[in-house]
């Protein structure tokens, strides 16, 4: 019997002895980080609401109870009983029974009403039918990504359970090493913005955090070096993804091409957004005639291996590592990622990309942890002078630019990341029109913005409190305002818009490195009455950065494949208060208000001068040991 | 045709066109770092003394010319002709003909007389017989190590040529990477003394520098991590060994057990000493009932893969790395190791263990390099107060201790490293007796000291100028003085010595961690009239360190295997001016007198406080960026 088998036997005995004698345990299994308890008495389990919580706290494990398949009622009768229990206003749109695990997935417009207060409705369902209910939200705006992901995972259920069981055994294996150390290796995004990637390693465990591309460059993370994947992708125990932007996620599917077969931990919205952006990444590569580094099959592999976690869940991901995600305020599902290592030995937090203060979309980043000895901190705006305008002033400036352009009869073109900045813009523009601050006019959403917005509305619990409330309780979903038009008619529709009246165009890519914004440049670029407004960070080497700094002759591939030069006549404006990134003050405050403060801070994810400025200021102001690492360095903390 | 084949074809064409038309080139091959040119006209080649030098400088390669086997004269006639050319005083003791390569190995008591002025006699030999002569010294004291090594290499000649050809192809492969970086990873000896080991890596090449054990501990270098051998020992291109002490060399044979099959670069004396010490390492392990990490077969593998280099030879060891050894002044053959990377990109020097000033045995360490951007510097005596007594004063003190002990009728026991400190002691004692500063009495050499001394006399060119001259020209070899007695009669002889009159005993191990010194402790330890004198560094955790700091109850394995406690009654003295290591002043001066000074210094190979003290002083005094790394860190320099 293997050690894990023995562990499970022991757990089964313990659980059986802890439970009332009329509740049987037929099997105990690991599935990823969870311990799944199968019982022939699911209804009795459900009646004792506290049993699971008590077991979980006693065993220090996340526990899921499932009915033994033998005792399940038939799906057709169960369906009726379930619908009887759930209030009609919940808006159930689908019920999906999985007899192999005794789970029923309930898709509803208002998941809260399916759950009930402290889970009371869920327990009632189990008491009635024995099945274990799981609830997902019906997207308020139809999202092909969300439905594709859900369908795919449904179809791959068997495979996925095998993966989860394997991962579960890995996580709960016995620790082998009696050494103690904690190290971080930098594989990218040091003294640069882009290709975020790190290895966190202990004698027992190797975790890859992020694996992104670099906008405006072909550079990828240093995966080939020995301490990355040199000895094979299977030497990695887990991948952790802080958020979906491609400079953090683009190359994750490549890991599976290299033979990785382990879990990806991230939040649920990041899982969906990641799939959307990665497929687009392949699409853009194909359109530009580049050979993409992996095929779409690998995106599906990544999806299949993703284990979504919620903010605040403390999760065992290795025998010596617990992972907890916290809101990072940057984009939907973005996470500050906290690792607790070796039962009290050491704590490392990776900020990922953060916004310190509240924005319209998100609450500000969490910086409150029980302990953090080392913080790996983004430094995008870490430079001495990288102070951003207050968002209120930025919004005023944006409205002024829109009004002036409208007066001239021109159009406003805003290059924006599909995910994050676009939705923030939509909220500003929707409110400004509602308040009469700017004239009503069509707002065209091009590229993946519409789809990304639909994903936002699927996960309102990840949005800022008051925005969530508007979407939940008042049916005032601002994203559904009638001005918003999804450009889904391709070049023809764009031509119509270009020939038409004043309007606002939000289009990807956010750094003008490809995508439909290239087409809008051609349509609107030569019009001196129109304005291009930059609202997000433009990395070095991107066309966006060049236009921002005054370039007005742009070499482009004309239709028919001939190269030509585009003379930009339109106004170029930068409104810089909308960044998804904390500015200099935000970064300093993020560290300042930490309690206790970390002993060490590594300043990464910023130009060379930004990381060095931030590193030196944190050192001087707070007397913390700080570093501005290069790529390919390894720091040992313990 | 492979790229290397093509390269060789091109070289053959170039060489042919550069040579006078009457000299033919029948083949061109790489053997390790050398280019071997086979010719049917070796005599003509030898007549044009400058040809090889010109070719070498034109092709920027080390060139060896060998006769085509077809044109060789018969060994029996060649032998006579050779002996006719060489002056009788050269003392030729052996001639060994290798028809496969056209080489004849001449062993002589005075190799200089076989070589002749600027190699004139060697050229004369080739002109006479066509064979390529190679000269080695007949050891003045018979050394079983030297003769074993020479016999083994003779017997493995075919295998070795295959290895060298393979290595040659590796070295001269085309560079693959267009990245540029230089990194050093610490695998041991950081904030500690012992288990020296580093990886120097570029995108193209990975070099392991040293691989030692840790005296007084079971700790070994972190070979298992991914960036060391995690992806397999074959990911290492070359091993470089700074000197033979076990804390630098003990685990090198283990690499071959792990599948390493590449070259070891070191000096010739280090090669011989390394074999001696490694075999002893296995022996000690066996005696102590430990399972040694490798078998003696692996020591032979290491030997077979060793490519000896001389001080000052600039040698290609990878497409992007040139290696040069320089005298380190620490022990016989010890080297400061200089790496020139990427044709001007970067230069890194590893000090290994150094002695900055001249000692009786060696000239002081070389610190003069064309360029060094980063220095990895030993810090054994790097602490603020680690100033050693001047060697003159130390010698006075030693003589005083010897005289006082003699007066009392006791014996002087000196634990000493077989290699280095023992020979220094021998020189001091021999001179003191000759001058009448101390009474004549037997000096017993136990453990491997005799054998190590024999190796020293085999390589006098590695000794200090005036000592070399004494051995060479005046036949005043101090190591042959009649007081010196080799303990080769085991326990019985020791008992006799213990029961006898006053004497001096030099015995290994130098840190009292095993070896015959343990026996001397038992014999002499309970005698209050005797004295133990420490003359070398005692690492933390060793018995030597404990005795030095006052422990006088020593648990030992008594005869018959029972544990007992030995009460030390003898005096304990420390005479600290004899260390093979630079003291604090020496380390500071080593850096101070470098010109240009390095940009960065990594202080390693010292206790935590020593490395930090030295690091901080170098920073403050010379404004150099300094570090006191931990093990398992990676620094990127470029």
Image: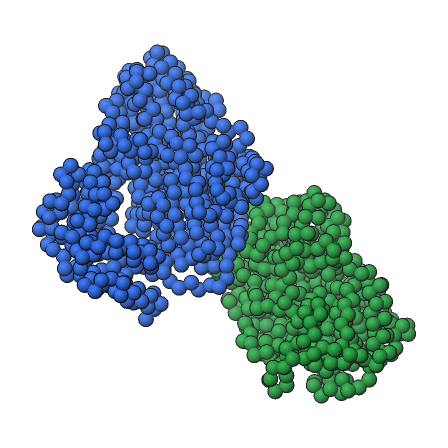
Chain colours: A green, B blue
x 49%, y 54%: residue: B182
- Give residue B573's position: percent from left, percent from top: 43, 21
Q: Looking at the image, which is closer to me, A529 or B296? A: A529
Q: Is residue B151 left or right of residue B310?
A: left
Q: Residue at the spot x=9%, y=50% of the render?
A: B76
Residue A175 in sight: no
Horizontal and vertical percent for residue A520? 72, 80
Residues A174 and B152: in front is B152
Res A558 → quadrant: bottom right
In this rendering, does residue B367 appear at all?
A: yes
Furthest residue to the right? A436
Which quadrant would the C terminus of chain A be assigned to in this image? Answer: top right
Q: Up-down: is B312 above or below A121?
A: above
Question: In the picture provided, is B380 more to the left or to the right than B510?
Answer: right
Residue B113 higher or lower than A202, as above or below: above
Q: Is residue B446 left or right of residue B105?
A: right
Task: Provide residue A467's location: percent of width, then percent of height.
Answer: 82, 67
> Which residue is painted at 48% across and 22% down in the image?
B550
Count of marks overlaid on the render: 0
Q: Is residue B194 above or below residue B225?
A: above
Residue extending farthest top = B407
Instruction: Where is residue B631? Give x, y as percent.
Output: 52, 45
User: Which residue does the image show at 76% across and 68% down from the upper left?
Assistant: A574
Viewer-nearest residue: B578 or A355: B578
């Amino acid at each position: 019997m293997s050690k894990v088998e023995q562990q499970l036997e022991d757990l089964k005995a313990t659980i059986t002895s802890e439970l009332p004698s009329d509740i049987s345990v037929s099997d105990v299994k690991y599935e990823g980080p969870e311990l799944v308890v199968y019982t022939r008495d699911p209804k009795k389990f459900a009646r004792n609401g506290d049993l699971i919580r008590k077991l979980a706290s006693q065993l220090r494990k996340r526990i899921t109870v499932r009915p033994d398949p033998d005792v399940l009622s038939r799906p057709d009768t169960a369906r009726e009983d379930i619908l009887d229990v759930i209030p009609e206003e919940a808006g159930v749109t689908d019920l999906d029974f999985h007899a192999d695990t005794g789970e029923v997935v309930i898709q509803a417009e208002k998941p809260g009403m399916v759950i009930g207060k402290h889970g009371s409705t869920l327990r009632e369902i189990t008491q009635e039918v024995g099945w274990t209910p799981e609830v997902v939200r019906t997207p308020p705006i139809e999202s092909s990504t969300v439905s594709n992901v859900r369908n795919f995972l449904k179809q791959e259920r068997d495979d996925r359970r095998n993966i989860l069981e394997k991962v579960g055994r890995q996580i709960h294996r016995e620790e082998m090493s009696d050494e103690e150390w904690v190290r971080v290796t930098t594989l990218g995004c040091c003294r640069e913005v882009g290709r975020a990637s790190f290895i966190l390693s202990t004698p027992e465990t190797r975790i890859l955090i992020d694996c992104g591309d670099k906008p405006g460059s072909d550079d990828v993370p240093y995966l080939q070096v020995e301490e990355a994947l040199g000895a094979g992708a299977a030497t990695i125990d887990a991948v952790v993804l802080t958020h979906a932007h491609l400079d953090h996620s683009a190359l994750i599917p490549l890991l599976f091409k290299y033979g990785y077969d382990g879990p990806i931990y991230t939040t649920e919205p990041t899982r969906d957004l990641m799939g959307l952006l990665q497929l687009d990444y392949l699409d853009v590569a194909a359109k530009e005639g580049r050979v993409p580094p992996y095929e779409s099959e690998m995106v599906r592999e990544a999806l299949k291996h993703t284990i979504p976690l919620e903010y605040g869940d403390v999760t065992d991901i290795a025998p010596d590592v617990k992972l907890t995600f916290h809101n990072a305020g940057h984009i939907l599902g973005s996470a500050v990622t906290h690792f607790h290592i070796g039962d009290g030995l050491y704590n490392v937090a990776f900020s990922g990309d953060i916004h310190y203060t509240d924005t319209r979309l998100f609450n500000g980043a969490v910086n409150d942890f029980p302990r953090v000895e080392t913080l790996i901190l983004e430094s995008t705006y870490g430079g001495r002078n990288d102070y951003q305008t207050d968002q209120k002033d930025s919004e005023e400036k944006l409205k002024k630019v829109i009004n002036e352009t409208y007066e001239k009869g021109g159009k406003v073109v805003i290059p924006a990341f599909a995910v994050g900045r676009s939705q923030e813009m939509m909220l500003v523009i929707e409110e400004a029109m509602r308040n009469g601050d700017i004239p009503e006019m069509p707002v065209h959403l091009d590229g993946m913005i519409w789809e990304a917005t639909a994903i936002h509305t699927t996960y309102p619990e990840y949005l800022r409190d008051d925005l969530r409330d508007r979407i939940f309780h008042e049916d005032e979903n601002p994203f559904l305002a009638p001005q918003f038009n999804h450009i889904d008619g391709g070049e023809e529709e764009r031509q119509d818009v270009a020939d038409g009246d004043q309007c606002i165009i939000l289009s990807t890519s956010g750094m003008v490195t490809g995508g439909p914004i290239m087409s809008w440049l051609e349509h609107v670029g030569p019009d001196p009455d129109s304005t291009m407004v930059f609202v997000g960070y433009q990395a070095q080497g991107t066309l966006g950065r060049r236009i921002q700094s005054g370039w007005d002759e742009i070499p482009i591939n004309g239709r028919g494949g001939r190269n030509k030069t585009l003379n930009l006549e339109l106004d170029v404006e930068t409104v810089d208060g909308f960044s998804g990134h904390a500015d200099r003050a935000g970064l300093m405050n993020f560290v300042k208000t930490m309690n206790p403060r970390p002993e060490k801070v590594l300043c990464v994810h910023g130009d060379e001068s930004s990381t060095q400025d931030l590193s030196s200021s944190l050192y001087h102001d707070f007397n913390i040991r700080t570093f501005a690492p290069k790529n390919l360095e390894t720091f040992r903390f313990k």
